[in-house]
Amino acid sequence: MERHKRGLVLVITGDGKGKTTSCLGQALRSIGHGNRVLIVQFMKGEKYGEILAIEKYLSERLTAIQCGLPSFVMKENPAPLDVELAREGLKIAEKSIASGEYQMVILDEVNVAMDFGLIEVEDVVELIRNKPPMIDLVLSGRYAPEEIIELADMVSEVREIKHHYHKGVTARAGIEH
């Protein structure tokens, strides 16, 4: 099968559940074609089910790096460590994209990290503009900035219509984490 001619920039945003899940599906498609994929998870430090599955079954072609704490980030007052970890995540992404080791790089929850002021929108814009032409780049999370949407080749919005949380059903292993 012939490789694609130009890497794409895909954005998955919106207030509905399923953005990270969509990224993981995209990763599976890519590794199914023999590609190597990196997922950098911003603002996440808990070993969610996807991290456990990657470590146990998929680590030969799919690498996941978490750049966050296992606690929520306070939007109006993020801890200095939250900022440091997010910035480190962006540096990891930049180095990994430049390395040529991966054909796809996923920046999970990077839109939220920008919205919370943990990383600068301009830095992510620069990363997109400077990525090698063959790399597919996927950015996820609520609140995708207009600058990112403008640069993207594809933008999908996941919209919440109904969620079990509003009926008092708490997060479950295998569904939310």
Image: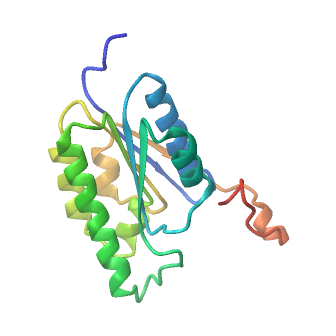
Displayed quadrant of residue 176: bottom right
Q: Residue at x 75, y 60 (%)?
A: 163
Q: Is residue 112 left or right of residue 28?
A: left
* Image location (x, y in percent) of residue 53: 59, 47
* Image location (x, y in percent) of residue 125: 22, 55
Q: Residue at x 46, y 75 (%)?
A: 69
Q: Is residue 175 left or right of residue 3?
A: right
The quadrant the N terminus occupies is top left
Numbered-mark total? 0
Q: Residue at x 48, y 67 (%)?
A: 44
Displayed quadrant of residue 7: top left
Relative to 54, residue 68 above or below: below
Can you see residue 158? Answer: no
Relative to 10, residue 115 above or below: below
Q: Nearer the viewer, residue 102 or 7?
A: 102
* Image location (x, y in percent) of residue 97: 23, 45
* Image location (x, y in percent) of residue 2: 32, 11
Can you see residue 13? Answer: yes
Q: How is the image coloured?
A: rainbow
The quadrant the C terminus occupies is bottom right
Q: Nearer the viewer, residue 42 or 122?
A: 42
Q: Is residue 167 left or right of residue 44?
A: right
